[in-house]
Amino acid sequence: AQSVTQLDSHVSVSEGTPVLLRCNYSSSYSPSLFWYVQHPNKGLQLLLKYTSAATLVKGINGFEAEFKKSETSFHLTKPSAHMSDAAEYFCVVFTNAGKSTFGDGTTLTVKP
Amino acid sequence: GAVVSQHPSRVICKSGTSVKIECRSLDFQATTMFWYRQFPKKSLMLMATSNEGSKATYEQGVEKDKFLINHASLTLSTLTVTSAHPEDSSFYICSASASRFYNEQFFGPGTRLTVL
């Protein structure tokens, strides 16, 4: 069994300040973990992925995430938020059993 | 590489009609394709998993006679919503994977279905 918990349904930051979107997971298998972003009425865009290589993963648009096995966490961060970062973010666990589990999503609002 | 397309991007139909949505992997052969449904301001819900040439595996609570999935080739899967009703209105997203992309799925841009 696997599950994903995004700890915040809404996060609001000011432009230029750091972003932290939190994700905890559980999985019976060795998981691959992903962060996707979805802008309104759009499909999913991959931000970054962890697939058992380096635990600190760098993605697009300045985002990065750190896989912490001891804490079963995969939090997404960005040093400085931009207005264009406002969107819905999903943390996803995929396993080699072919199953995917999505978190409920975090809505990021960026204030000018 | 690893591009997935969906067609149509948007469809409006009358209640009682059937609608077919196509999902294509454009530059790789997808051994497995997945269909998701997303309600407004909600996360994605996996509906079914299909492997080329075999019957789809549906998630609990998903009506297989309502949502017909065909995975006829390594680059094409179709989802047919039969006798659509307004409650079937939703955003449908497909994804595709292949063994060489370890544990990764590539998502299509989604299809917005509105049933009147």
Image (cartoon, coloured by chain):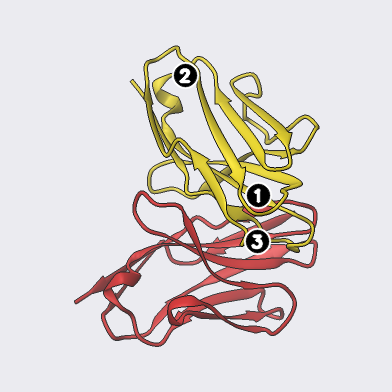
Chain colours: A red, B yellow
Q: Tag 3: residue type? A: Val
In percent of width and height, residue B7 lies at 49, 37
Q: Are marks 3 and 1 on the same chain?
A: no
* Side of B11 where A27 appears, left or right: right
SS for callout 1: strand
Residue B96's label in the rendered image is 1
Q: Tag 2: residue type? A: Ala
- The quarter in which the N terminus of chain A is drawn is bottom right
Image position of A72 with respect to A79: above or below = above
Q: State the separation of the CA atoms marked 1 and 2.
A: 25 Å
SS for callout 2: loop
User: Residue drawn 75% across and 76% down?
Assistant: A52
Front label number (3 vs 1): 1
* Residue A38, quarter of picture: bottom left
Residue A93's label in the rendered image is 3
Q: Residues within 10 Å of mark 2 (few under 14, many from 20)?
A: many
Q: Tag 1: residue type? A: Ala
In percent of width and height, residue A103 lies at 54, 58
Front label number (1 vs 2): 1
Residue B110's label in the rendered image is none
Residue B84's label in the rendered image is 2
User: Residue drawn 66% across and 24% down?
Assistant: B64
* Residue A73, quarter of picture: bottom right
Which chain does the numbered disc 2 sit on? Answer: B
In percent of width and height, residue B15 lies at 40, 15
Upstream in the sequence, badge 1 or badge 2?
2
Q: Residues within 10 Å of mark 3 (few under 14, many from 20)?
A: many
